[in-house]
Image (cartoon, rainbow, N blue to C red):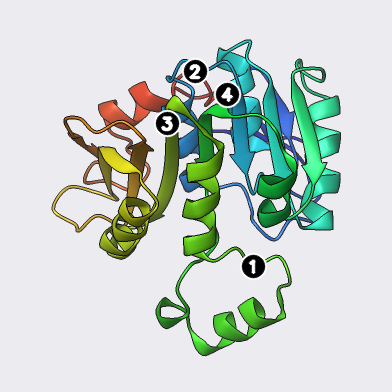
Amino acid sequence: MNSRTGSSHSRPFRFKQFSLSDEGCAMKIGTDGVLLGSVAAGYPAARVLDIGTGCGLIALMIAQETEAPVTAIDSEEGAINAARKNVAQSPWPNQVKVIQCRFQEFVLEVNESFDLLVCNPPYFRKSLLSPDEQRNLARHSGCLPAPELLDGVARLISPEGHFLIILPAEQEMYVETLALESGLSCRRKILVHPSPGRKPKRIILGFSQQAGPLLSETVVIENEQRHAYSEAYMALTRKYYLDF
Protein backbone atom coordinates (compact mmCIF):
# COMPACT_ATOMS: atom_id res chain seq x y z
CA MET A 1 0.00 0.00 0.00
CA ASN A 2 2.66 2.48 1.01
CA SER A 3 6.36 1.83 0.67
CA ARG A 4 9.44 2.67 2.64
CA THR A 5 12.74 3.99 1.34
CA GLY A 6 16.18 3.40 2.77
CA SER A 7 17.57 0.48 4.73
CA SER A 8 17.02 1.21 8.43
CA HIS A 9 14.00 0.60 10.62
CA SER A 10 13.32 4.34 10.66
CA ARG A 11 13.14 4.83 6.89
CA PRO A 12 10.14 6.94 5.87
CA PHE A 13 6.72 5.88 4.72
CA ARG A 14 6.04 7.09 1.19
CA PHE A 15 2.60 8.20 0.10
CA LYS A 16 1.65 9.68 -3.27
CA GLN A 17 2.32 13.30 -2.40
CA PHE A 18 4.42 13.18 0.77
CA SER A 19 6.69 11.02 2.90
CA LEU A 20 6.99 10.89 6.66
CA SER A 21 8.74 9.05 9.48
CA ASP A 22 7.28 7.87 12.78
CA GLU A 23 10.69 7.48 14.44
CA GLY A 24 10.48 8.49 18.11
CA CYS A 25 6.67 8.32 18.19
CA ALA A 26 4.76 6.09 20.57
CA MET A 27 1.89 6.00 18.05
CA LYS A 28 3.13 4.41 14.83
CA ILE A 29 1.71 4.86 11.35
CA GLY A 30 -1.03 2.30 10.74
CA THR A 31 -4.31 1.55 9.07
CA ASP A 32 -6.33 3.44 11.72
CA GLY A 33 -4.66 6.74 10.94
CA VAL A 34 -4.89 6.29 7.19
CA LEU A 35 -8.58 5.41 7.42
CA LEU A 36 -9.41 8.40 9.59
CA GLY A 37 -7.35 10.77 7.47
CA SER A 38 -8.99 9.54 4.28
CA VAL A 39 -12.48 10.07 5.70
CA ALA A 40 -11.65 13.44 7.27
CA ALA A 41 -10.14 14.80 4.06
CA GLY A 42 -13.58 14.65 2.46
CA TYR A 43 -15.06 17.20 4.86
CA PRO A 44 -15.07 20.90 3.91
CA ALA A 45 -13.46 23.06 6.58
CA ALA A 46 -11.98 26.51 7.07
CA ARG A 47 -9.99 25.52 10.19
CA VAL A 48 -8.83 22.03 11.17
CA LEU A 49 -7.55 20.63 14.48
CA ASP A 50 -5.70 17.30 14.70
CA ILE A 51 -5.76 16.18 18.36
CA GLY A 52 -2.83 13.92 19.23
CA THR A 53 -1.17 14.26 15.84
CA GLY A 54 1.65 11.79 16.45
CA CYS A 55 4.03 12.06 13.50
CA GLY A 56 1.57 14.33 11.65
CA LEU A 57 0.05 11.73 9.32
CA ILE A 58 -3.60 12.83 9.49
CA ALA A 59 -2.71 16.53 9.43
CA LEU A 60 -0.73 16.04 6.22
CA MET A 61 -3.44 13.90 4.64
CA ILE A 62 -5.95 16.68 5.23
CA ALA A 63 -3.52 19.36 4.04
CA GLN A 64 -3.13 17.45 0.77
CA GLU A 65 -6.85 17.77 0.03
CA THR A 66 -7.69 21.24 1.37
CA GLU A 67 -6.22 24.71 1.61
CA ALA A 68 -7.51 25.14 5.17
CA PRO A 69 -4.95 25.80 7.90
CA VAL A 70 -4.36 22.72 10.05
CA THR A 71 -3.34 22.92 13.71
CA ALA A 72 -1.70 19.70 14.92
CA ILE A 73 -1.18 19.26 18.67
CA ASP A 74 0.49 16.57 20.78
CA SER A 75 1.92 16.41 24.29
CA GLU A 76 4.64 13.87 23.52
CA GLU A 77 8.03 15.36 22.69
CA GLY A 78 9.04 12.53 20.37
CA ALA A 79 5.86 12.91 18.37
CA ILE A 80 6.24 16.68 18.13
CA ASN A 81 9.81 16.39 16.88
CA ALA A 82 8.75 13.90 14.23
CA ALA A 83 5.69 15.92 13.20
CA ARG A 84 7.65 19.15 12.86
CA LYS A 85 10.26 17.44 10.71
CA ASN A 86 7.65 15.74 8.55
CA VAL A 87 5.68 18.95 8.04
CA ALA A 88 8.82 20.93 7.21
CA GLN A 89 9.74 18.40 4.53
CA SER A 90 6.20 18.19 3.12
CA PRO A 91 4.66 20.28 0.31
CA TRP A 92 2.62 22.16 2.96
CA PRO A 93 5.08 23.54 5.56
CA ASN A 94 3.13 26.78 5.95
CA GLN A 95 -0.31 25.19 6.07
CA VAL A 96 0.23 22.86 9.05
CA LYS A 97 1.14 24.33 12.45
CA VAL A 98 2.53 21.87 15.01
CA ILE A 99 2.11 22.75 18.70
CA GLN A 100 3.38 20.85 21.73
CA CYS A 101 0.78 21.00 24.49
CA ARG A 102 -1.81 18.94 26.29
CA PHE A 103 -5.27 19.15 24.78
CA GLN A 104 -6.73 20.28 28.10
CA GLU A 105 -4.38 23.29 28.08
CA PHE A 106 -5.08 24.05 24.44
CA VAL A 107 -8.83 24.20 25.12
CA LEU A 108 -8.31 26.83 27.81
CA GLU A 109 -5.89 28.96 25.80
CA VAL A 110 -7.28 29.03 22.27
CA ASN A 111 -9.75 31.71 21.21
CA GLU A 112 -10.99 30.23 17.94
CA SER A 113 -13.32 27.46 16.85
CA PHE A 114 -12.67 24.69 14.34
CA ASP A 115 -14.84 23.33 11.54
CA LEU A 116 -13.16 19.92 11.56
CA LEU A 117 -11.58 18.16 14.53
CA VAL A 118 -10.00 14.71 14.26
CA CYS A 119 -8.54 12.31 16.81
CA ASN A 120 -6.91 8.89 16.60
CA PRO A 121 -6.55 8.19 20.33
CA PRO A 122 -4.23 5.46 21.65
CA TYR A 123 -6.50 4.45 24.52
CA PHE A 124 -9.46 5.46 26.68
CA ARG A 125 -10.64 2.96 29.23
CA LYS A 126 -8.26 1.09 31.51
CA SER A 127 -10.66 -1.83 31.65
CA LEU A 128 -9.91 -2.55 28.00
CA LEU A 129 -6.14 -2.62 28.50
CA SER A 130 -3.81 -5.40 29.50
CA PRO A 131 -1.93 -5.03 32.84
CA ASP A 132 1.21 -3.97 30.98
CA GLU A 133 -0.73 -1.38 28.99
CA GLN A 134 -2.33 -0.06 32.17
CA ARG A 135 1.11 0.46 33.69
CA ASN A 136 2.25 2.29 30.59
CA LEU A 137 -0.87 4.47 30.74
CA ALA A 138 -0.27 5.28 34.40
CA ARG A 139 3.25 6.45 33.55
CA HIS A 140 2.11 8.54 30.60
CA SER A 141 1.65 12.15 31.73
CA GLY A 142 -0.06 13.14 28.48
CA CYS A 143 -3.10 10.96 29.18
CA LEU A 144 -6.30 12.36 27.67
CA PRO A 145 -9.37 10.73 29.24
CA ALA A 146 -12.37 10.41 26.96
CA PRO A 147 -14.62 12.73 29.03
CA GLU A 148 -12.04 15.52 28.83
CA LEU A 149 -11.60 14.96 25.10
CA LEU A 150 -15.34 15.19 24.39
CA ASP A 151 -15.83 18.20 26.67
CA GLY A 152 -12.94 19.98 24.97
CA VAL A 153 -14.23 19.19 21.51
CA ALA A 154 -17.65 20.58 22.44
CA ARG A 155 -15.96 23.85 23.41
CA LEU A 156 -13.86 24.15 20.25
CA ILE A 157 -16.18 22.89 17.52
CA SER A 158 -17.92 25.49 15.36
CA PRO A 159 -21.74 25.46 15.14
CA GLU A 160 -21.63 23.65 11.80
CA GLY A 161 -18.42 21.76 12.50
CA HIS A 162 -17.64 18.05 12.65
CA PHE A 163 -15.57 15.85 14.97
CA LEU A 164 -14.24 12.52 13.72
CA ILE A 165 -12.67 9.80 15.85
CA ILE A 166 -11.59 6.20 15.23
CA LEU A 167 -11.99 3.68 18.04
CA PRO A 168 -12.04 0.00 18.88
CA ALA A 169 -15.58 -1.08 17.98
CA GLU A 170 -16.39 -2.06 21.58
CA GLN A 171 -15.94 1.55 22.72
CA GLU A 172 -18.75 2.86 20.51
CA MET A 173 -21.49 3.16 23.13
CA TYR A 174 -19.14 4.52 25.78
CA VAL A 175 -17.96 7.37 23.57
CA GLU A 176 -21.42 8.06 22.13
CA THR A 177 -22.80 8.45 25.65
CA LEU A 178 -20.03 10.85 26.65
CA ALA A 179 -20.50 12.85 23.46
CA LEU A 180 -24.23 13.19 24.07
CA GLU A 181 -23.54 14.42 27.59
CA SER A 182 -21.24 17.05 26.06
CA GLY A 183 -23.91 18.22 23.61
CA LEU A 184 -22.63 16.39 20.54
CA SER A 185 -24.85 14.31 18.26
CA CYS A 186 -23.59 11.28 16.37
CA ARG A 187 -24.15 11.90 12.65
CA ARG A 188 -21.97 9.26 11.02
CA LYS A 189 -20.79 5.71 11.76
CA ILE A 190 -18.37 3.68 9.69
CA LEU A 191 -17.90 0.09 10.83
CA VAL A 192 -14.50 -1.25 9.78
CA HIS A 193 -14.31 -5.01 9.21
CA PRO A 194 -10.89 -6.64 8.71
CA SER A 195 -12.38 -9.11 6.18
CA PRO A 196 -15.79 -10.48 5.11
CA GLY A 197 -17.63 -12.36 7.83
CA ARG A 198 -15.45 -11.06 10.66
CA LYS A 199 -16.67 -8.72 13.38
CA PRO A 200 -15.74 -5.04 13.06
CA LYS A 201 -12.51 -4.17 14.85
CA ARG A 202 -12.76 -0.40 14.49
CA ILE A 203 -15.45 2.22 14.13
CA ILE A 204 -15.21 5.80 12.90
CA LEU A 205 -17.70 8.09 14.60
CA GLY A 206 -18.66 11.55 13.35
CA PHE A 207 -20.19 14.09 15.72
CA SER A 208 -21.74 17.54 15.36
CA GLN A 209 -23.56 20.07 17.50
CA GLN A 210 -26.41 19.85 15.02
CA ALA A 211 -28.89 17.01 15.42
CA GLY A 212 -29.92 15.21 12.27
CA PRO A 213 -30.07 11.90 10.42
CA LEU A 214 -27.39 9.28 11.05
CA LEU A 215 -25.34 8.02 8.11
CA SER A 216 -24.25 4.40 8.70
CA GLU A 217 -21.62 2.75 6.50
CA THR A 218 -19.42 -0.32 6.40
CA VAL A 219 -15.89 -0.74 5.07
CA VAL A 220 -14.17 -4.12 4.66
CA ILE A 221 -10.37 -3.84 4.53
CA GLU A 222 -9.40 -7.10 2.85
CA ASN A 223 -11.17 -9.70 0.75
CA GLU A 224 -10.83 -13.38 1.59
CA GLN A 225 -7.11 -13.44 0.78
CA ARG A 226 -4.51 -11.65 2.90
CA HIS A 227 -3.46 -8.31 1.33
CA ALA A 228 -6.19 -8.60 -1.31
CA TYR A 229 -7.76 -5.25 -0.49
CA SER A 230 -11.41 -4.54 -1.13
CA GLU A 231 -12.57 -2.09 -3.78
CA ALA A 232 -14.21 0.06 -1.10
CA TYR A 233 -11.00 0.34 0.92
CA MET A 234 -8.91 1.09 -2.16
CA ALA A 235 -11.38 3.74 -3.31
CA LEU A 236 -11.29 5.40 0.10
CA THR A 237 -7.48 5.53 0.33
CA ARG A 238 -6.51 5.78 -3.34
CA LYS A 239 -5.43 9.42 -3.11
CA TYR A 240 -2.69 8.39 -0.69
CA TYR A 241 -1.42 4.83 -1.11
CA LEU A 242 1.16 4.38 -3.85
CA ASP A 243 -0.09 0.96 -4.95
CA PHE A 244 -3.74 2.00 -5.27
Foreground residue among 127 and 158: 158
Q: Quadrant of residue 136?
A: bottom right
* SS at badge 4: helix
Location of residue 44 in the rendering, given as x and y in whole percent from the top left corner: 46, 15
Question: Mark 4 vs mark 2: which is more N-terminal?
Answer: 4
Q: Which mark is residue 143?
A: 1
* SS at badge 1: loop
Question: Mark 2 vs mark 3: which is more N-terminal?
Answer: 3
Q: Which residue is mark 3?
A: 162
Q: Residue at x 29, y 65 (%)?
A: 170
For the residues labelled 3 and 4, the Cα–Cα distance comes to 14 Å
Q: Which residue is mark 4?
A: 62
For the residues labelled 2 and 3, the Cα–Cα distance comes to 22 Å
Question: Mark 3 vs mark 4: which is more N-terminal?
Answer: 4
Label 1 or label 4, whichever lies nearer to me, is: 1
Q: Which residue is mark 2?
A: 239
For the residues labelled 2 and 1, the Cα–Cα distance comes to 32 Å
In the rendered image of this protein, does residue 121 appear above or below residue 184?
below
- Judge from the rendering whether residue 70 lies leftward or rightward of residue 9; answer left or right: left
